[in-house]
Image (cartoon, rainbow, N blue to C red):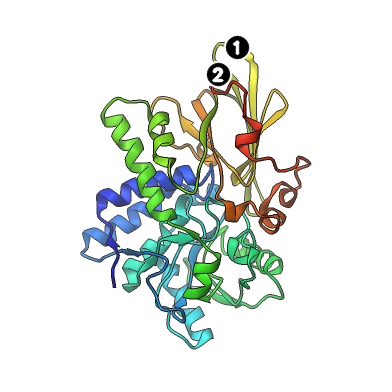
């Protein structure tokens, strides 16, 4: 089997790139990176394989953590439930997994399949089902293009394990959310069991290697004392994420964040340094959903809205936002597979109760001055 073995250096690049693609959410990948790094230092391997590597009928079990990112900060995951969740789903299906993969390429959940791959010697497919991070399990390209999410498995750090076989993907999310809350606000899951042919049809390809590319670009820019945002834009060039641009620069002047029903929800407001009356307000549910500059939408889900440290380009997640931070808000367009009518029905603005229609970020910002 061909593929690329991760090193500690490429893992660190991937973790930073994944935090960018997490668009403020997905959980901070730092803890997950440390868990994977320990596996590598103990001699285990993590092999990332292309989406077309496996035979059509090979079983793929995507893996992730579920819960509010604020919980992961207060009580970091141990990684013990990872294997239990996969083994429980294998037993339920009566089949053995040939590979795992991320359900989302952003944040902590870019790391958890890598941990599972190291623990069990499973390859990890270079693709995912969100192309970013989303807060709910039905918000997957897998679901958009006809893959049932259940049966799914769910496990805790305490030894609890359960199988959920829901009527539909929305019901699966609701049942799993309740169980996650009962498990302490964080749980390990395996869902969307499918064959490799279905992965090829429904997944967003190449997102793990894209994360490495973004992380390496930001790291190199810092080492060379170059503009990290120019480096980020250059890293996106020629990828399926075709547009990347600065929306706003300023400092955090207000933050309203609370953990509700298993989600980190709230708003953050930034003011321009040279004009405090010029403000940008971001609404989030784990991930950033919509950015409004002086009341006008400048980017909206499913396009990515990233909050990055103005000096270094380092991503700042929603649970780490704090008053006085100097941030640059950077927008990235989503791939075409995430902009179809069916995809927008699943994870467009209306899916989050937003009144605004979806307009691609490159249209919202065309001919306007951004980055003030």
Q: Which mark is residue 275?
A: 1
Residue 283 in sight from this viewpoint: no
Front position among marks 1 and 2 = 2
> Where in the figure is residue 169, as x and y percent of width and height?
67, 68
* 325 and 219: which is toward the camera: 219
- The reply, left or right, for residue 323 in relation to residue 298 is left
Task: Check the picture and name the quadrant holding the N terminus.
Answer: bottom left
The secondary element bearing badge 1 is classed as strand
Q: Are marks 1 and 2 in contact (CB under 8 Å)?
A: yes
Q: Residue at x 59, y 66 (%)?
A: 142
- Quadrant of the image occupied by residue 312: top left
The secondary element bearing badge 2 is classed as loop
Q: Residue at x 40, y 36 (%)?
A: 234
Residue holding disc 2:
372
Task: Check the picture and name the quadrant holding the C terminus.
Answer: top right
- The reply, left or right, for residue 225 in relation to residue 68 is left
């Amino acid at each position: 089997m061909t593929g690329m073995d991760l090193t500690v250096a490429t893992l660190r690049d991937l973790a930073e790139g994944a935090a960018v693609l997490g668009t403020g959410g997905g959980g901070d990948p730092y803890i997950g990176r440390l868990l994977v790094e320990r596996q590598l230092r103990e001699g285990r391997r993590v092999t990332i394989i292309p989406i077309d590597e496996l035979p059509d009928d090979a079983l793929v079990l995507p893996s992730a953590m579920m819960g509010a990112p604020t919980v992961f900060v207060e009580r970091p995951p141990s990684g013990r439930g990872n294997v239990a969740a996969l083994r429980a789903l294998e037993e339920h299906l009566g089949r053995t997994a040939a590979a795992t993969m991320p359900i989302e390429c952003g944040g902590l959940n870019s790391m958890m399949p890598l941990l599972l791959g190291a623990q069990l010697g499973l390859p990890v497919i270079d693709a995912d089902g969100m192309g970013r991070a989303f807060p709910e399990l039905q918000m997957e390209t897998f679901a958009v293009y006809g893959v049932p999410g259940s049966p799914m498995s769910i496990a805790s750090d305490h030894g609890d394990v359960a199988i959920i076989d829901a009527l539909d993907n929305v019901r699966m999310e609701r049942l799993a959310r309740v169980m996650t809350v009962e498990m302490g606000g964080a749980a390990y899951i395996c869902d969307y069991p499918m064959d490799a042919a279905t992965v090829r049809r429904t997944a967003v390809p190449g997102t793990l290697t894209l994360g490495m590319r973004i992380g390496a670009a930001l790291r190199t820019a810092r080492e060379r004392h170059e503009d990290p945002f120019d480096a980020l834009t250059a890293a996106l060039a020629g990828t399926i994420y075709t547009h990347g641009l600065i929306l706003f620069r300023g400092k955090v002047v207000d933050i309203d964040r609370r953990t509700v029903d298993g989600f980190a929800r709230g708003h953050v407001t930034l003011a321009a340094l040279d004009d405090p009356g010029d403000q940008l307000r971001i609404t989030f549910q784990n991930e950033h959903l919509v950015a409004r500059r002086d009341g006008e939408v400048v980017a909206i889900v499913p396009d990515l809205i990233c909050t990055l440290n103005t000096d270094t380009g380092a991503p700042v997640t929603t649970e780490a936002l704090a008053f006085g931070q100097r941030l640059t808000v950077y927008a990235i367009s989503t791939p075409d597979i995430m902009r179809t009518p069916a995809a927008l029905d699943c994870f467009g603005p209306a899916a989050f109760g937003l009144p605004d229609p979806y307009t691609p970020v490159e249209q919202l910002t065309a001919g306007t001055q951004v980055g003030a």
